[in-house]
Amino acid sequence: MAHNGALSRRELALVAALLVSATIAEAARLAGVSQRSASRYLARAEVRAELARRQGDTLAAVSARLVAVMAESVGVLGELQSSEVVSAAVRVGAARAVLEHGVRLFESVALAERVSQLEAVGEARSRPARQIQDLTDAELERVASYGR
């Protein structure tokens, strides 16, 4: 079958099934296609790109829901940590959870900032010298702050 870049109905069905299946075989069965066809579809860059896009959308939606309940979770841990009604072990566990996750969050934010700085350096280095003068003040500051 010749492709013009658009996904067929069966390819779209496979992509949708892959989002809810543990295996390609299960997804193929749900989509009503053979495993051989599923493998052939997945060999196409357009199918893989659509799958990646939809997986990204799903992850973004899950992340948004997680962020929405995180504040409540921190509040529960805070209440447990300061409660005199629960055992010391529960209070220590709550405090440990807050500290461990707080440190992980700090590390993730710091890592994201460093990646952003490295990307700015990479972008600046890939530009011809005459274009570096065109960097914004914010970009110049990010580049200059790398390694501090």
Image (spheres, rainbow, N blue to C red):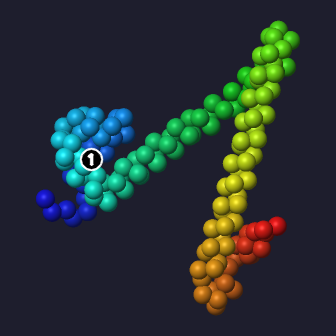
**Image vertical order of residue 76 relative to residue 98, above or below:** above
What is the residue that sits farthest to the bottom in this orientation?
130
Q: Residue at left 64%, top 78%?
A: 124
User: Which residue has dot 1 on it?
Assistant: 12
Q: Residue at left 62%, top 37%?
A: 67
Q: Is residue 5 left or right of residue 103?
A: left
> Which of the two residues, 12 or 104, is positioned nearer the viewer here?
104
Q: Is residue 127 left or right of residue 28?
A: right
Count residues near mark 1 (Cα–Cα under 10 Å), then give few for <14, some for 14-19, many for 20+: some
Residue 28, position in %: x, y? Answer: 24, 39
Q: In this orientation, does residue 35 appear?
A: yes
Quadrant of the frame with the C terminus: bottom right
- Which type of secondary structure does the marked residue at label 1 adopt? helix
As shown in the figure, which amino acid type bears the numbered disc 1? Leu
Residue 123, position in %: x, y? Answer: 61, 75
Residue 43 in which image quadrant: bottom left
**Image vertical order of residue 79 relative to residue 8, above or below:** above
Q: In this orientation, does residue 9 appear?
A: no
What is the residue that sits farthest to the top in this orientation?
85
Q: Residue at left 67%, top 73%?
A: 121
Residue 137, position in %: x, y? Answer: 74, 75
